[in-house]
Amino acid sequence: MMFPQTFLLAWLGIAAIPIVIHLLNRLRHRTVRWGAMMFLLKASRASVRSARLRHWLVLACRTAAFLAFALMLARPLAGGLVGRWLRGAPEEIVILLDRSASMNALDLSTRVPLREEALRRLAEVPASVLRGARITLIDSATLDPLPLADLEALPELAAAGPTDTSADLSALFAAASRHLEATGTGDAEVWVISDLQTSSWQPAQRAWPETLARLSALAPNLPVRILRVGPSPRGNVTLQLDQARLRPGPGEAVLELDVIIVQDIDEQTALPASLTLNGVRSPIELRTSGYETRQSLSLPLPPDASERGWGRLELPPDAHPGDNAVNFAWSPPPRIEVALRSEEPEAARLLGLAAAPDPRLGRTLAPLPSAALPPLDDKALLVWQGRLPPPETARDLTTWVEDGGVAVFLPPVDAGETAEVAPDSPLGLTWGGLVSRGDDDPLRIAFWEEGDGPLARTRDGRSLDLDGLLLARRRDVVLPPGEAGEGWAALATASDGQPAVLRRILGRGRMYAVTTLPVPEWSNLGRGPVLVPMLHRMADEGGARFAEAVVTFDGRMPASVLAEGPVVPVSGEDDPPDPAVQAGVYRAGGRMWAVNRPPAEDDRTQIEDAEALALFAAAGLPASVRRDLSGGRDAGSVQREIWRLFLILAVLFLVGESVLLLFDRARRPAPVATAQGEEPAEAAA
């Protein structure tokens, strides 16, 4: 038994009240020996023993009642069968299902996908565990609550089927909180089905404390039962797409395909693969040189596919069939226009040279006026240096980014200026104070993300020269609390532990923030080895929405495209993929979409049980991690409130006291009536 509110145990002191009153009453009486009374005491000694026993029983009942009331106020928790029996049946059981791509890996013991194995175990939960509770399913792909009549049909539901998407467990719990708030359910349980993949749980995510605090406020001591499936598959080979680009030539066009092969062994191996180009399949061999291999393929294209087309590269099935294929599409590269707004002339010159050094390379620069922001519909990248835009402009920028645009913000120069942004600003960003280290002790870059984004390695595996980047000045970045500042993540961190480059993903677009400037007084960023590739990659991200062929890594088609019109798979398979939740090649709105699973789903690291439980312990929610939900060996590991037991005990003790007092009163002789002025016989005696 445990007490989450230990300070309320101070109420145990009230149990001493009946004892103190008893001792005070004894001090009020003095024993006087009187010879005439000795005969009466000897005659009624048996009655005295009985009365004394009842007296001690009454005192014990009163003390126990006070103790029970004090323990009830402390809201104790108990596990095991006692806790389960006392809690009774929950009103509702909310099942949170992780449908991320990693759940498609095969279970090591049953050789079936983890998701299917988890659903099978869930369907076998006996009715005695459910005890007539309502059942609601919320899955990670849709976050929509779905009422269920029973668990037996769960494995056949489309809402529980496989996906190639990622999962956000904090968003799942937020959806559960919204559902319980809408239904007004306070007595519930939450069952979580997940492989505890680190990228899905992200225990350090800022949304966790607020989400679980809200859930705890709706349903205090809500039991959370986590069904863990796994472990990660062994003997698996993962195929990832780096990029596919068309290289036109005077003769035949060539498609340059860069892929990454990740395996469990540090060996050189030859892997048979299948290559599909515009529906024509042919065998191909890939070679590995260790745990991770980057391989570039130059594929001659037939005349009918020299300008646009689609393809698929696939490995044979293994322990995780879902990570064995990549989809790609190609078309002539679009012309990219970069919009630039800068308050500092030297920064504007260097940023313009880095973003669009030569119009003949297909990149042009459009300087923006310092006044109102013109439409950006035809722009791929917005470079904004200086004070952040006002709320009205920020909302327009956010809408543009959600449609696929990319914006990068750099700080103002003046040390006395900070761009104030309302806490609910769509940008979710505020420039803070100026940090100046000088040329003698500059900051360096301690860490940067090399696997993804504008600071990733080059195609041949080389790192950008961030080791040589020196920061004499930078500005702090202040993120407002709550959802307004949610989503920003550091891509590069300075040696003082503060972010140097941040990214926020919004819809189909990206926002970036760089905390220094490419001018000599601030840093050596303006030299070019980092600034040029970084801005070019950002522009390529924003220009992708203008291309006829689009390659995405979200595991599904964008919701905005699905809402605009029909989305048709082009692979011609007997069982075509679902564009809402699965990767594949689709045709929509006159464009070709090659959809791949999110790169984070290829990260097999998982959090420990204790790390998951710590999230809920911080919010006061009892939780357990288990391998089944049938109520077996660890059925009572979840602590449950048992204050009702102590309330019942307190009432029983009070009833017992009343019975003893009534019994004592019934045994007393009735007083004898006397003449006026005389004392009753009992009193006289």
Image (cartoon, rainbow, N blue to C red):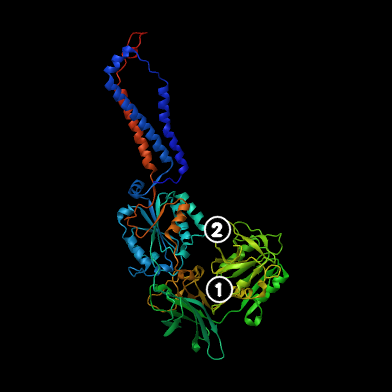
Label ID, residue 216:
none
The quarter of the picture where the C terminus appears is top left
Q: Nearer the viewer, mark 1 or mark 2?
A: 1
* Res 478 → quadrant: bottom right
Q: Position of residue 598 (x, y in %)?
A: 48, 70
Label 2, secondary structure: give it.
helix
Q: Is residue 427 above or below residue 454?
A: above
The disc labelled 2 sits on which kind of residue?
Answer: Glu
Q: Nearer the viewer, residue 499 or 45?
A: 45
Residue hosting label 1: 456
Q: Position of residue 658 (x, y in %)?
A: 34, 29
Say few, some or many: other residues with alpha carbon within 10 Å of mark 2 (under 14 / 14 to 19 / 20 or more): some
Say few, some or many: other residues with alpha carbon within 10 Å of mark 1 (under 14 / 14 to 19 / 20 or more): some
Label 1, secondary structure: give it.
loop
* Res 529 → quadrant: bottom right
Residue hosting label 2: 483
Nearest to N terminus: mark 1 or mark 2: 1
